[in-house]
Each structure stands twice: as C-alpha cells, then as structure tokens.
Amino acid sequence: MKFVLPAAALAIMALLAAWPSLNGPPTPRVSADAGQSEMLKPRYFSLDEHNQPFSLVASKADKSADQPDIVLLDDPQAEMTETTGTWVTMRSDKGWYNQNTGILLMRGNVHVLRDDGNEFTTSEAEADIRKGNAWGEKAVTGQGPQGEINAIGFRMTDRGKNVVFLNQSKAEVQAAERPGSKKP
C-alpha cells in the first residue's frame, strides 16, 4: 500500500494534467501530393466594370496541372446580378473556369434560372461571367410563366435579361389574360 497509493495519486495527477490535450480538437493536418492544389467549397465574388456583382462557387476546385490558368470545378454555380437586383444563376455537374478570360465552360445537367421564374436546361454551355453573357449549341428544354420551349442552342445577354433560342425552336405559349377578363 505504501507504493500503490502514491503511484495511483501520481497517475491521477498526470491524467489531470494531460486532460485538456486529450479533449481538445485534433490538430489539423494538411497534406497534398506534389503539384496538387485542391480547395473545398471555394467562393469567388467580384464586380464587373459597371459595378455589377457576379460570383462563382463550387463544391470543389482543382488547379489544372497542364494549364495553370484553368480551374477544374465540381458542382459549379455562377450568379450574375444587375445593380437593379435582377439576376440569373447557372449551375452544372462539372466546370472549367479560365481565370484569364473569365469564361466558364459548364457540362452535365446545366440548369439556368432567371429571377422572373423562367428556367431551362441543357447538357453544355459557356458563360462569360464577368460580362454576363452565356451561350450553348446543345438541345435546350425550358419552362416559365409564359409556357415551354424546346430548342437547339441559346444566346443569353445582359445578365439574363435577353435570351434567344436558336435553330429549330418550338414554343408552347400560354395566352395572357387581359385585364378585366375572367377565366371560364
């Protein structure tokens, strides 16, 4: 007992001294392969030459090893807003952003949504997020308050204010209700 009680007391004191480091958060460790840089949930916000905001966010970004100006993006989402508050958002499965030109190439389930409720999807599109323009040459399907659209390609300018559908476009437009008229 002469040795057991002092040894137990010493062990308890050592445990009490070490307790804060045992309960504290683990020390973060950063590791990457040589030449690899990856960011999780990157966010890029800026203003264009007319002080209109635009942003680009993604779930993950990788720097291209062979093209230093290209950033590879998972689940990119670009938003272009006017100073008046109108906006357009584009998102897709994958993206390639050129930091020099400001061009974003989007592929896989490209979804375009405007603040007026109009939206359309395509498989591939490009956007100049600094200037607020976008375009695509693939099949487009869309819908909005006025009806539905099917086309092969589109051009969007003025941060989504103007959208032109190309080639063999087919629209099903709902008749607008005149003021004072009643639905049957």
Image: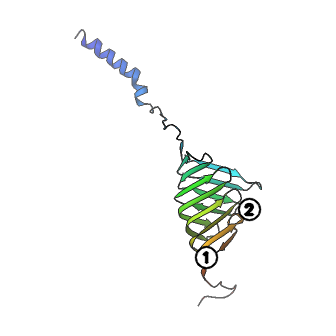
> Can you give x and y, in whole percent of width and height, for residue 3 in the image?
25, 10
* Label drawn at residue 145: 1
Task: Check disc 2 and report its element: helix, strand or loop.
Answer: loop
Q: Residue furthest top?
A: 2
Q: Earlier in the sequence, mark 2 or mark 1?
A: 2
Q: Is 76 located above or below residue 180 in the figure? A: above
Residue 181 versus residue 147: which sits nearer the camera? 147
Classify 10 Å Cα crowding around label 1: few (below 14), some (14-19), many (20 and above).
few
Q: Position of residue 43 (x, y in %)?
A: 60, 49
- Residue 171, percent across and down? 60, 81
Q: Residue at x 60, y 50 (%)?
A: 70
Residue 84 circle label: 2
Q: Which residue is nearer to you in this view: 70 or 118?
A: 70
Give how far apart the Cα atoms at labels 2 and 1 are: 21 Å
Quadrant in which the N terminus appears = top left
User: What is the x, y in percent for residue 36?
Assistant: 52, 41
Compared to residue 24, the image places residue 82 above or below, namely below
Query: Looking at this rendering, what residue extends furthest in the left direction?
Result: 1
